[in-house]
Amino acid sequence: MLFTFDVSGAQLKVTILGSGTPIPSIERFGSSTLIEYKDKKYLFDVGRGTTIRLSQIGIKASEIDHLFLTHLHSDHITGFADLWLTGWIWQRKNVLNVYGPNGIENFIRHTQKAFSSDISFRKKQTKLSEKGLSLNVQTVLQGIIYKDDDVTITAIKVDHGSVNHAYGFRFDTEANSILLSGDTTLSKNLIKQGENLDLLIHELAVIEPNLIESNPKLKKLLITIHHWNK
């Protein structure tokens, strides 16, 4: 399922490419959200099938220059190699900038090693640009992590249980603000940073009432949603 909506006319468009879980589903591909503003594209998470979803809305992997990862759970990153290498095959013109939490450099380094044979084969057989294969990797800490003439992106530390480094992202333009929670339980920090928004994209789950009563963690999730609904 693809969800696309304009926040401010044609200038700012948000597309939920996938909202699934680690369990495979043809109806809900892996976690990934695309924000388009003016002539630039910003991708948040790259779960299973992201490049296919991009193709469905007429966007090539090579058009993505900025990728932001909320955390390193598999269902948020399994589409990375596909985005990176398919973008290279489609003649990416720019370096792919990857912003992620502690551990991102290790993940990228091992992914590059895993596909070293494929890369070697393609270099011998084709004239693909070396620049299109290049990666600029930056480790995210809380605060402003990206800024250009039109957009400011801020990382917000959230509580994702045993995941020590998990973030939501706030996307601000001159006229609009969007917040992506990433995976989180009750997070006072996220609530504090979530003021004066035009759009909130928040992780949630549909749960049977009897499970809510027996599970403190699920109750905390409902508290978070209730707070924002006030």
Image (cartoon, rainbow, N blue to C red):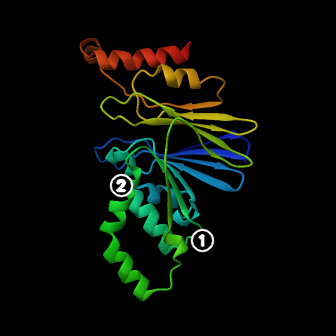
Q: Residue at x 70, y 49 (%)?
A: 148
For disc 2, the neighbor class at 10 Å (few under 14, some 14 to 19, many from 20) is few
Residue 98: x %, y % from top left:
50, 54
Q: Residue furthest bottom?
A: 125
Helix, strand or loop for disc 2? helix
Front of the two marks 1 and 2: 2
Residue bearing mark 2 = 107
Tell me where residue 86 sits by quadrant: bottom left
Q: Amino acid at mark 1?
A: Lys
Q: Amino acid at mark 2?
A: Phe
Residue 45: x %, y % from top left:
46, 47
Left or right position of 52 against 151: left
Tell me where residue 73 sits by quadrant: top left
Q: Residue at x 41, y 63 (%)?
A: 82
Q: Which mark is residue 93?
A: 1
Residue 29 visible somewhere in the drawing = no
Residue 78: x %, y % from top left:
35, 54
For disc 1, the neighbor class at 10 Å (few under 14, some 14 to 19, many from 20) is some
Left or right position of 94 against 11: left
Left or right position of 37 against 220: right
Residue 104 visible somewhere in the drawing = yes
Where is 50 relative to 228, above or below? Answer: below
Q: Residue at x 66, y 34 (%)?
A: 177
